[in-house]
Amino acid sequence: MQERTPKASTNRISRVLAVLAVCFLVLACVSNIEYDLDPRQGWWEGNGIVVPHDSFPSDCRLCHVEGSWNEIREDFEYDHEQETGVALVGAHREAKCLRCHNDRGPVQLFSQRGCAGCHEDLHRGNFGDQCVSCHSEETWILRDEIAVHNRTRFPLVGAHAAVQCWLCHSGGEVGDWVRLDIECASCHLEEALAATDPDHAANRWVTGCDRCHIPTTWNGAGFNHFAFPLTGAHASADCGACHVGGVFTGLPTDCAGCHSQEYQQANDPDHVAGGFSMSCELCHDTSSWDGAMFNHASINSGCAVCHQDDFNATTNPNHLAAGVSQTCEMCHGVNNWSPANMTHAGITTNCAVCHITEYNQTTMPGHAAAGFPTTCEACHGTAGWTPASFNHSFPITSGDHGGFDCADCHTTPGNYQAFSCIHCHEHRQSKMADKHSGESGYSWNSNACLGCHPTGQD
């Protein structure tokens, strides 16, 4: 019998340990399968059924956290568009991979069906299969639902745009979105029967609500008063003020039919004594009785028939003293005495006949002291004294001399007949005498300068 060497003993021990290790692993696997302790043999049900990994890389650590099949690495990145040609946008970008990629079958088969390939139609086919007409990939929350509804037989306006959908579509909360009757009474019959001011039931106004009301409000502001448009003060009046005793038919539409008492009591001016027309709208509007715009087209006689006192009392200017014509419309309008627009077409005498006081009091420049003519129209217009446009008798107000103030040339205060040229120009008398030698009539004074140089040029 051969003696065993230490090396042979070592090899045998190693083989025994290896067999024991394999047995231990088998037992461990069986134990873990039985009690579902090994995550490698199961999955997290929240992610759905595991998609086959046959075509995946063999290195599991590319996607999974080591030691856990259920946990994906935080730094895991997968460019879905680059790898598959399909871009994930909105909520699809955040969805779990297994929501689409599982053992139901090839994902391409379901994507061809559009939204219905993955998402159950909660609307029971009432809205067709074009989910994108109301929803987006960002969220299931409705998008532009008002605009979408406005393409139906019943646009949502006013108060209808603010109510919850299922207040009309009672089955909407469980996906039953059926077509509804669009007549107001189909939803608002109870309101019509309960209305007492006026009594809708007694007047048989329980259908066709839109003949009187608009979707904004039930109250008077939304009432469509077709036969007699409500404007101005009429819009805020209580219905009973006109419809006394609940009578809503056969009422007059002319002003005097309701306002004859106001006509009788008017005394500024006295409408009855003046024989005023009872067509109140000729002068008044619906906003207020005050601020009436009298229609003078029906008046054939002169204004002074009514306004002689106003003519006599006028002092600016004094109409009587100046002999102003009593054809008031030459200057005044029918809205007010002022502002007046004096038409000078009929004035043949000099302006100073009426405006000598203004002439004498003018100091900038002093007209009287300077000996200005009293032909005011030479400088002034008929609209106002200022701005004045002086018609200079010499064309020396242009070129280098344009924009000068009067006093720049008229150096003698109050005397605008005198002027000076030589005080401003840097000439020496001796130099100018040499320059003008041989010029007939030359002299060193401003009048001579202007005589030869009327435009201010050499």
Image (cartoon, rainbow, N blue to C red):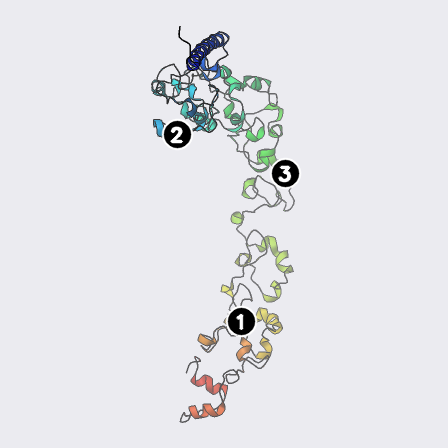
* Secondary-structure class at tag 2: loop
Tag 1 residue: 376
Percent across and percent down for residue 59 are: 40, 23
For badge 2, the amino acid type reads: Asp
Give the side of residue 5 with respect to residue 217, left or right.
left
- Mark in the foreground, 1 or 2: 2
Percent across and percent down for residue 54 are: 35, 18
Question: Between marks 2 and 3, how big is the CA–CA gap?
Answer: 84 Å
* Secondary-structure class at tag 1: helix
Between 283 and 138, the one lying in front of the other is 138
Quick check: marks 1 and 2 in contact, CB under 8 Å? no
Q: Quadrant of residue 122?
A: top left
Name the residue furthest top: 1
Percent across and percent down for residue 75 are: 46, 29
Is the residue marked by circle 2 packed among few (<14), some (14-19), or many (20+) residues within 10 Å? few
First-in-chain label (2 vs 3): 2
First-in-chain label (1 vs 2): 2
* Secondary-structure class at tag 3: helix
Tag 2 residue: 79
Residue 392: in sight, yes or no? Answer: yes
For badge 1, the amino acid type reads: Cys
Between 248 and 302, the one lying in front of the other is 248
Is the residue marked by circle 3 packed among few (<14), some (14-19), or many (20+) residues within 10 Å? few
For badge 3, the amino acid type reads: Glu
Please tell me the numbered disc located at residue 262.
3
